C-alpha cells in the first residue's frame, strides 16, 4: 500500500505533462504489483492489489489525455465558440491575432481553479499591457451569487445566460479578477483541447499556434505557464 501510494503520487502529476515518462513508471508499478500478487499466499493481498485497478486506470486515462495534448502542440488554435461574455468586452478570433492568448478552462465550483487566481491576477497585471490576453473559459452551470457567503452556489431554478453572466461579474469582483470570462457554446471547444480536468490552461502564440498546455493548479504548472508567456512576449524571441 505504501509503495502504491508513493508511486501513484509520483506518476499522477506528470501523467499529462510527461506522458511517456508516466507510462514507463506506471508500467513498472504494475509489474511490481503483479509480481507481489502472483507470489502472495494471503488472499487479502490479492484483493488489495485488485482494488488499485481503478486508480491505475484513472492514471492511464490522464496519460492518454496527455498524449492527445502533446499532439496538439504546434497546431492551430480552435476558432472561438462562445455564447456570451462577462467581465470584459466580447472579442473575436480577429482580435486575438498578434496576441499571446492564455485560455483558462475553469468553473466557479472548482477549488483547484480558485487556487490559480493569484497567478492569473499576476499575469494579467504584468503582461496584459505587453500583448497577453487571458480568457477564462467556463460553461453554464446554473449558479447564482450568494452575497452573504461570498460564494457562488447552485440554484434549484434554471438561470438565464444573463443571470449567469451577472453572477460571474460578482464572482470576478469578489476575487479581484480583471480578465474576460467566456461561457462556451457547447462542448466542441473543450473537446478540441482535450479538456478532461480543470483547471486546464492553453497558451497560444501570436501566430495562433498552440505552444503549451497544462492541467492542474500545481506550482510547477504555474512556473511553466509563466515562463512560456514571458518567452513569447520577449521581443528577441518574437523576432526570431
Image: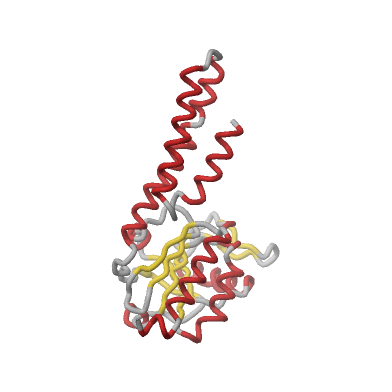
Q: Is residue 209 above or below residue 141?
A: below
Could you say which quadrant of the image residue 98 lies in? bottom left
**x, y percent for residue 230:** 49, 77
Q: Residue at x 43, y 69 (%)?
A: 103
Q: Residue furthest top?
A: 41
Query: Which quadrant of the rendered structure holds the C terminus?
Result: bottom left
The N terminus is located in which quarter? Answer: top right
Image vertical order of residue 57 relative to residue 74, above or below: above
Q: How many marks?
A: 0
Instruction: Pinpoint residue 58: horizontal percent, then vertical percent.
Output: 45, 41
Residue shown at the point (48%, 26%) measured from the top left: 50
Q: Nearer the viewer, residue 47 or 92?
A: 47
At 48% from the left edge and 69% from the top edge, which residue is drawn? 136
Q: Position of residue 28 (x, y in %)?
A: 45, 36
As drawn, 116 above or below 17: below
Q: Nearer the viewer, residue 190 or 109?
A: 190
Residue 82's x, y, as percent? Answer: 37, 70
| Colour style of the rendered protein structure | secondary structure
State the residue lying farthest toward the right: 148
Viewed as shown, does residue 4 lie left or right of 22?
right
Q: Nearer the viewer, residue 179 or 82?
A: 179
Q: Is residue 46 left or right of residue 69?
A: right
Amino acid at each position: 500500500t505504501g509503495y502504491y501510494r508513493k508511486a501513484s503520487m509520483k506518476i499522477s502529476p506528470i501523467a499529462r505533462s510527461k506522458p511517456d515518462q508516466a507510462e514507463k513508471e506506471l508500467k513498472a508499478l504494475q509489474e511490481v504489483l503483479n509480481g507481489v500478487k502472483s507470489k502472495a499466499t494471503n488472499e487479502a493481498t490479492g484483493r488489495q492489489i485488485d482494488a488499485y485497478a481503478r486508480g491505475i486506470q484513472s492514471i492511464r486515462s490522464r496519460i492518454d489525455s496527455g498524449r492527445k495534448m502533446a499532439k496538439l502542440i504546434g497546431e492551430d488554435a480552435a476558432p472561438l465558440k462562445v455564447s456570451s461574455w462577462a467581465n470584459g468586452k466580447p472579442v473575436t478570433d480577429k482580435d486575438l491575432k498578434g496576441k499571446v492568448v492564455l485560455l483558462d478552462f475553469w468553473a466557479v465550483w472548482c477549488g483547484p481553479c480558485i487556487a490559480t487566481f493569484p497567478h492569473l491576477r499576476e499575469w494579467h497585471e504584468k503582461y496584459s499591457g505587453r500583448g497577453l490576453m487571458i480568457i477564462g473559459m467556463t460553461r453554464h452551470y446554473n449558479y447564482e451569487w450568494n452575497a452573504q457567503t461570498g460564494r457562488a452556489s447552485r440554484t434549484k431554478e434554471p438561470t438565464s445566460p444573463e443571470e449567469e453572466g451577472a453572477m460571474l461579474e460578482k464572482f470576478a469582483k469578489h476575487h479581484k479578477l480583471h480578465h474576460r470570462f467566456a461561457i462556451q457554446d457547447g462542448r466542441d471547444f473543450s473537446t478540441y483541447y482535450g479538456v478532461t480536468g480543470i483547471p486546464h490552461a492553453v497558451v497560444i502564440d501570436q501566430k495562433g499556434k498552440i505552444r503549451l498546455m497544462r492541467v492542474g493548479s500545481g506550482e510547477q504548472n504555474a512556473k511553466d505557464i509563466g515562463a512560456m508567456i514571458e518567452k513569447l512576449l520577449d521581443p528577441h524571441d518574437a523576432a526570431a
